[in-house]
Image (cartoon, rainbow, N blue to C red):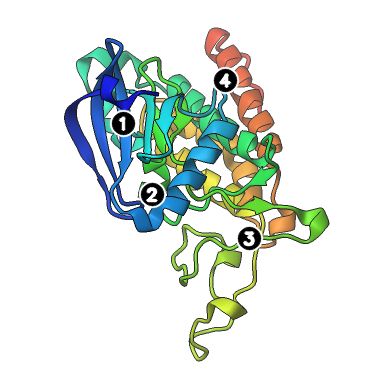
Amino acid sequence: MATDEVQRTENLGNDAVTMTSVFLSEWKENKVVLSQLTNSELKEDFLHGLKMLKALQSKHVVRLLGYCEQQFTILTEYHPLGSLRGLNETLHIPKYKGMNTWHRRLMLAIDYVSVIRYLHSSPLGTLVMCDSNDLDKVLSQYLLTSDFHVLVNDLDALPLVNKSAGKLVKCGHRELQGEFVAPEQRWPYGEEMPFEDDLMPPYDEKTDIWKIPDVSNFFLGHVEGSDVVRLHLFDIHAACKKKDPAERPSAQEVLDTYRKVLTLLIREAAMPGTREML
């Protein structure tokens, strides 16, 4: 990719963690996103993110259009609706008000779980979505496309689980707190013993499953019918919140249940009077 062909038009912001500047740019008469590393000390992380982006190209992942390793730049497809953090604001724009239904919102949740399922059974193996310590952080990792689909955009922190080889993961080296992260991600030895990364037990991809109900709750929002959807998802969400990670369902099982509920509720909406409980 010849970077001199890319015309920067607007600074979309800087990421203080990954030390990248992000620009809306023009390339071959298309709007694209140019990400440029600003701190060469983080070049290993940057190149790892690029490697993941290349290896995981699929309908679930933002499209890589070009890159220049020497200049630490990556070109990806531009999605004007931005990250999922702005979903509720987008759905209140007159143009998109018709999308603000339980049906469309459940389909976004299905998209999200599809991404998790893809990462858990990716060409590289079982990958854990580590940049997910609170809801806002999760939402910032994903993009909303103009035709209302969900794409994962940030692949910098995806460690590999390989249970048969006894390889588990830890998301970072700091203590994680709060109800949003899975119980096994929290320091298990109480307050009397100060946190030590070396003593923190590792865990597997079921941390992602624990977070699904909270992310889906955001997707479903507060529109007519969304509480009926929540009712139908109650059991699978309770299973996602099992304290023992081994008892939680796989992403595939969650996805199958979500799709079943969507089919059932569409059928009920089309034929009122045929209410059948799951």
Q: Where is residue 251 in the image (x, y as percent from the top left)?
A: 66, 39
What is the CA distance from the residue labelled 1 to the residue labelled 4? 41 Å
Disc 1, disc 4: CB below 8 Å? no
Q: In which quarter of the image is residue 68?
A: top left
Q: Mark 2 points at which residue?
A: 137
Q: Mark 1 points at which residue?
A: 34
Q: In which quarter of the image is the C terminus?
A: top right
The first of marks 3 and 1 along the sequence is 1
The first of marks 2 and 1 along the sequence is 1
Q: What residue type is labelled 2?
A: Lys
**Structural crowding at the residue carrying mark 1, measured as other residues with C-alpha within 10 Å and reported as few (<14), some (14–19) or many (≥20):** many
Q: Which residue is drawn at the image coordinates 27% and 24% (left, top)?
A: 4
Q: Which is more foreground, mark 3 or mark 2?
A: 3
What is the CA distance from the residue labelled 4 to the residue labelled 3? 38 Å
The answer to whether residue 77 is above or below residue 247 is: above
Q: Is mark 4 on a helix, strand or loop?
A: helix
The answer to whether residue 200 is above or below residue 116 is: below
Q: Position of residue 265 (x, y in %)?
A: 57, 20
Q: Name the residue under label 4.
A: 265
Q: Is residue 156 visible?
A: yes
Q: What element carries label 3?
A: loop
Q: Name the residue under label 3.
A: 169
What is the CA distance from the residue labelled 4 to the residue labelled 2? 31 Å
The first of marks 4 and 2 along the sequence is 2
Q: Which amino acid does label 3 sit on?
A: Val
The first of marks 4 and 3 along the sequence is 3
**Structural crowding at the residue carrying mark 2, measured as other residues with C-alpha within 10 Å and reported as few (<14), some (14–19) or many (≥20):** few
**Structural crowding at the residue carrying mark 3, measured as other residues with C-alpha within 10 Å and reported as few (<14), some (14–19) or many (≥20):** some
